[in-house]
Image (spheres, rainbow, N blue to C red):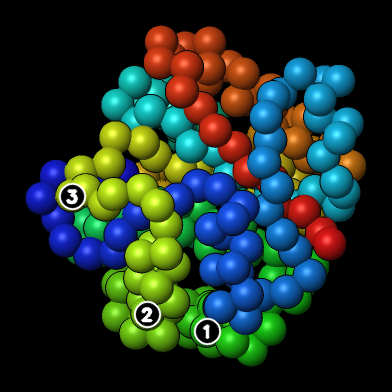
Amino acid sequence: MAPKGKAGWQALESNPETINPFLKKIGVSGVECVDVYSFDEEMLQFIPTPQFALILCFPSAEAREFLSKQYEEVEKNGNKPEGVFFMNQSEEIGNACGTFALFHSLANLENRIKLGRGKFGKWLAKAKLVKEDERSDLLSEDTDLAEAHEETAEEGETEQTDHVDYHFITYVNKDGQLFEIDSCAPFPRPLGATTDSTMIKDASVAIKELMENVQNLSFSAMALVGK
């Protein structure tokens, strides 16, 4: 979510019809996004494998207090993870939390999927060399990615606004461990072991807990899977 009145990148529509062409534009291949319509176990069996990540869209204001408490608990217990690619979203970049969720997913799957040598791969190589708090500015200054992002946003059917009330986070299977990564949080949140065939089911435990604590039930989700 971007602060009201901040310029910058426009929000991308959260559907496979938007994200999959964007992946192609930035040079990523071998993966695609598919809709997740329900977290009921009988529905999860229809999601393809391997399951790499899950991008969740939800009402930001209602969820922020609950999520903040989860991260406070992680910090109190000394469970802040290391070795996970992470960046905070700066105000200057605008309504790009969906893009941050996608890029967090891709960056933490570097050795498992085909990131290629295109726009994203080139940016990631540079981003790994700078500090976490410098990566958002590095992204906002990347004209190649900004151009691909703007082009994709303009192809969408949703009218753009300065203020977006929804936020995106991702759940990623990094080397057999599940992490919740939120660009507005202080660090990734570890959620335990997972596999390529159970990742969505494992992530659904944390997601259902979030849903139970948020009155607004307007959630949507996409899985990043192999193809």
**Secondary structure beneath label 2:** helix
In the image, residue 156 sits, relative to residue 144, either above or below, namely: above
Q: Is residue 174 visible?
A: no
**Image quarter hosting the C terminus:** bottom right
Q: Classify 10 Å Cα crowding around label 2: few (below 14), some (14-19), many (20 and above).
A: few
Q: Which of the pair 16/82 is nearer the observer?
A: 16
N-term mark: 1 or 2: 1
Relative to 103, 36 lies left or right: right
**Residue nearest the observer in this picture, 29 or 81:** 29
Residue that mark 1 sits on = 119
How many numbered badges does the structure rendering display?
3
Q: Secondary structure at mark 3?
A: loop
Residue occupied by mark 3: 162
Q: Residues within 10 Å of mark 1 (few under 14, many from 20)?
A: many
Q: Amino acid at mark 2?
A: Glu
- Are the residues flagged by discs 2 and 3 in contact, CB closer than 8 Å? no
Q: Earlier in the sequence, mark 1 or mark 3?
A: 1
Mark 2 = which residue? 147
Residue depicted at x 54% and y 68%:
22
Residue type at mark 3 is: Asp
Left/right of residue 69 with respect to residue 32 in the rendered view: left
Depth check, mark 1 against mark 3: the one in front is 3
Residue 83 percent location from the top left of the image: 62, 61
Considering only vertical position in the picture, is 72 above or below 7? above
Q: Give me the disc on residue 19.
A: none
- Residue in the image at 85% along x and 46% along y: 48
Instruction: Kindly check if marks 1 and 3 are in contact, taking CB atoms under 8 A apart as contact.
Output: no
Q: CA distance from mark 1 to mark 2?
A: 10 Å
Q: Position of residue 93 (x, y in %)?
A: 27, 63
